[in-house]
Image (cartoon, helix red, strand yellow):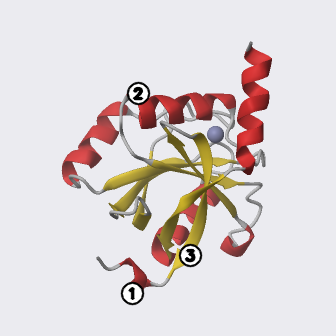
Amino acid sequence: MEKHEENKAVAREGIASEAYVNISKAAWLTLCEDAYQRRHMEACGALLGRRDDQGNWHITRAHPLRNIASSPVYFEFDPQELLELELRYPGEMVGVYHSHPGGYARASSTDRENMQRVNVEQCIPWVWLIAVGPFECPVTSTVMLKAYHHYEDRGLVLVRVHLAEEAELQP
Ligand SMILES: [Zn+2]
């Protein structure tokens, strides 16, 4: 059962969403810098912006958050810190990011469980970004970003990532 589910999920990596994520250069730089600074553990944080009527995500800012697990293979937000951020920026948190410093270029089984739980069971329409390591130098152009969303009808799909000019992010 477990194995079968795994294969199904891996196959789905080939399915791309029609929706896309626009990420501002500022957010991209913050995210890459964070992944580099915390390269011995999984860096993680919130993505702030908006989701449009077509279901695309427009990320203007990335906001690093503590990884209370302090692990190179796992991340866990501090629930209190996450709550404070949501209160500070009501309605602006449209996704989260974390890094894979070891270079694993897919959503892990834990990631996929989290994506399904939050997107489908909790009905929170976050996009999930994973920055794929290793982060040996602070050059952001070498950082690969993978984006995911778990749709109720289609399951887990990859979302295209577009590095946006600031003008494209205006509502
Ligand atoms: Zn992960």
Q: Quadrant of residue 8?
A: top right
The yes-or-no answer for disc 1 within 8 Å of ligand 1 is no
Provide the residue designation for mark 1: 167
Amino acid under label 1? Ala
Q: CA distance from mark 3 to mark 2?
A: 30 Å
Q: Mark 2 or mark 3, which is nearer the start of the sequence? A: 2
Give coordinates of residue 160: x percent, y percent. 61, 63
Q: How many marks?
A: 3
Q: CA distance from mark 1 to mark 2?
A: 34 Å
15 shown above or below 115: below
Provide the residue designation for mark 2: 121
Amino acid under label 3? Leu
Give coordinates of residue 124: x percent, y percent. 36, 40
User: In the orientation shown, which residue stands out farthest toward the top?
Assistant: 1
Residue depicted at 67% across the width and 41% down the height? 107
Label number found at residue 163: 3
Label number found at residue 53: none
Secondary structure at badge 2 equals helix
Secondary structure at badge 1 equals helix
Between 87 and 22, the one nearer to me in the picture: 22
